[in-house]
Image: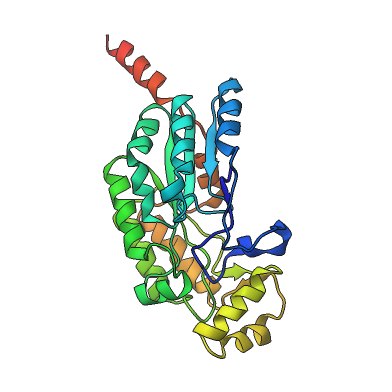
Amino acid sequence: MNLFRGCTHGCIYCDSRSRCYRMNHKFEDIEVKENGISLLEESLKRKQKKCMIGLGSMTDPYIKEELRLNYTRAALEIVNKYGFGITLITKSANVLRDLDLFKEINSKAKCVIQMTLTTYDEKLCKKIEPNVSTTKERVEALKILRDEGIPTVVWLTPILPFINDTEENIIGILNYCKEAKVFGIICFGMGVTLREGNREYFYSKLDKKFPKLKERYVGEYGNSYVISSRYNKKLMNLFHRFCEQNNVVHDNEAIFKYLSLFERKDILNQLSFFDEI
């Protein structure tokens, strides 16, 4: 579920700007689903079979407006109240604000935090993701989650041709993932997807931040939806080899299966207790 529509992160590649999503307001003007919390509670208290609840597929659940509104926290409290599992995807170290709830949920069911990492270089990070936690801040959050027993998954996407599709960048991010002991890394390939709407925004940002790079994109990719790096094969081989050597799950299907699998830990703990008796 998504509690917000629109975003203020300002990431130059954001797919949520695509016209297919038909927003009736400026993307930076956040639309709040005011009845989202009540609808969630009504749904969960009637649902007999427990499952994983997902947050943040369209809009980051920790945009700056959340720190004032506390909608994400309210949703987590309801998930915890009714004994469901939670997984969410973010680019914000503000996720740590709700560490207490994550720990409580994870003690009874399953809680998995997904974090997007795209850029090892901090200056480049602020260029392509200007209003969000830096990569180092996100990695520190991953380490704290690790230390608290909260499993994490990293999204290594998008990788922008001519910008961050370098071996140095990929190795830097992978080493961060190794340090944080992430469960898995999701990667669909080294590249980016551009739909109508986000393509125009992306190109306008290229003109301002990377002069003359727009012409290179247009000349090489035209209006293609899938924009693959010319180094895709080499970098993907590096990615898979690193993950295999460091016991990091890197099969997307296996990771999505893990994210969707609900686990009831409190019952397992009770059974284990009676087995010992």
Q: How many marks?
A: 0
Q: Is residue 271 left or right of residue 210?
A: left
Relative depth, front residue between 3 and 152: 3
* Above or below for 277 versus 176: above
- In which quadrant will I find the N terminus? top right
| Residue at the outermost bottom position | 212
> Could you tell whether 55 is left or right of 154 in the image?
right
Give the residue displayed 35% in from the left and 55% down from the top.
246
Q: Is residue 110 visible?
A: yes
**Image quadrant containing the C terminus:** top left
Residue 56 x/y as whole percent = 53, 49
Residue 161 position within the rendered picture, expressed as x and y whole percent measured from the top left = 54, 78
Instruction: State the image quarter where residue 213 is shown.
Output: bottom right
Q: Determine the image quadrant of residue 105.
A: top left
**Percent of width and height locating residue 205:** 56, 79
The residue that appears at 71% across and 74% down in the rendered structure is 224
| Whether residue 44 is situated above or below residue 3 in the rendered picture | above
Which residue is situated farthest in the top direction here?
Answer: 277
- Residue 147: image location, x then y, percent: 26, 44
38 shown above or below 6: above
Q: Residue at x 41, y 56 (%)?
A: 92
**Figure colour scheme:** rainbow
- Residue 247 in sight in this render: no
